Image (tube, rainbow, N blue to C red):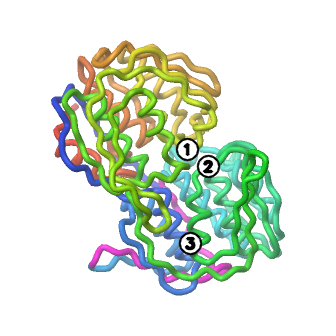
Amino acid sequence: MSLNPKPTVMRALSSSSLKGVVSIPGDKSISHRSLILGALAIGQTRITGLLEGQDVLDTAKAMVAFGAVVEKNDQSEWLVDGVGVGGFAEPSTVVDCGNSGTGVRLIIGAMSTTPINATFTGDHSLNSRPMERVTNPLSKFGVTTFGRSKGRLPMTVIGARSPIPVKYDVPVPSAQVKSALLLAALNAPGETIITEKEITRDHTERMLSSFGADISVENISNRRSIKLCGHSELNGQNICVPSDPSSAAFPICAAIIVEGSDIFVPNITLNETRAGLYKTLIEMGANLSFENEREESGEPVADIRACFSPDLKGVEVPPERAASMIDEYPILSVVAANATGKTIMRGVKELRVKESDRIDVMAKGLRANGVFVDEGEDWWVVKGNGMGSVKGGSICQTFLDHRIAMSFLVLGLSSQNYVEIDDCLPIKTSFPNFIELMLEIGANMEVRDL
């Protein structure tokens, strides 16, 4: 079971201009998938730029538990010697996935069509989150699971002894559900077909193709159909992980709302299934530019320059954009608090089942700092009164949610008074050097002694 160290309270205060080059760690989604697919491949996968946050390190440990060899060499490359599709061994102990919902859901999918058993657990936050959205469709392959009420961890997964191919329409936009099913389909005979109504991040499809899977993607009548033929052999690859656009969102949004700021953020993936926030910021009037656009490891990449943007306007974010920016709504709400007018966000009920109920947690924290927020089950509205209008002066609960913690710290950088968070430690799960990086470019943040 994961143990949580003593919380560390942190305060962010109004800052002068943020300036400099900001090197963002590797993309978390691609990092998870690199390790898992490397473990399912034959031969060695060599990974550069892997995110070394706790979430990804927990996935690396899990792959070792299933029989792969995972090591970091002297050149800071991660090497994965895989066991092949269907080659996972049964773990000798409980697999602890820490705080990572992506990690545990994808790993459950990857092992679910192999005739082995595995028990999964995590920290308090992960163990409170629903797994049925993944385990229910996986049962169609012949998988059996035993968990706590509402499908929560700890959970034992009994892999299908004779898996069958599946046809499944994903009911809500979820890259985790889609990816878990595709990973399960690798060791099922015949053709599995996954259909999604709204396009979600497609790193799994891209990477499966590069590893040699028999996979095809087709857009039909506003639906996206993904076909995968099982029992293909995957071959180890050389992977260069681009920088994470979700992590980049925090210094970029900070630069947009802190007067005089001008930062340069290189090597950010601009995959269309991940770039919704940047489209929205430009619509709001943000001063962003994209330079040196290129392709690396099958992903579109660019360098981003972000400057202070004093005349931001509230916008209505199209609900169909939600899947491409679902992790960025908390930081978008901080920008919206500094814009003029209402920013309306719809089709976002997915936020209620993340590391925390992100709508509820952000709404409470913003209100405590003087920002108007209205919310419903599947929508929320933030009304801003212009740049520098946020009063601040309150402490915000983070509920062990890394994106909530970073969002409220960014809020404090342009508020009239400090903004505090009850614990900055969860930030390390996805962005280990966030605080150091922000201090280097001029952010006014400090640990508060209690």
User: What percent of the width, then of the height, locates residue 266?
Assistant: 30, 54
Q: Name the residue under label 3.
A: 37
Q: Quadrant of the C terminus?
A: top left
Q: Distance between the residues labelled 2 and 3?
A: 19 Å
Q: Quadrant of residue 10?
A: top left
**Dot 3 amino acid type:** Leu
Residue placed at 59% from the left, 34% from the top?
Answer: 352
Check if mark 1's residue and mark 2's residue have beta carbons within 8 Å: yes
Which of the two marks, 2 or 3, is nearer to us in this view? 2
Mark drawn on residue 200: 2
Q: Tell me which label, 2 or 3, sits earlier in the chain.
A: 3
**Dot 2 amino acid type:** Thr
Q: Tell me which label, 1 or 3, sits earlier in the chain.
A: 3
Crowding at dot 2, Cα within 10 Å, few <14 / some 14-19 / many 20+, comes out as many
Magenta: predominant secondary structure element? loop
User: What percent of the width, then of the height, locates residue 2?
Assistant: 46, 55
Crowding at dot 1, Cα within 10 Å, few <14 / some 14-19 / many 20+, comes out as many
Would residue 449 be visible to someone looking at this image?
no
Question: From the viewer's perspective, is residue 317 above or below residue 372?
Answer: below
Mark drawn on residue 324: 1
Q: How far apart are marks 1 and 3 (CA)?
A: 23 Å
- Which residue occupies the foreground of this view, 82 or 61? 82
**Dot 1 amino acid type:** Ser
Question: From the viewer's perspective, is residue 59 above or below residue 349?
Answer: below
User: What percent of the width, then of the height, locates residue 128?
Assistant: 58, 43
Mark drawn on residue 177: none
Residue stretch rendered in magenta on the structure: 75-98
In the displayed structure image, the side of residue 12 where residue 87 appears, left or right: right
- Which residue occupies the foreground of this view, 7 or 309? 309
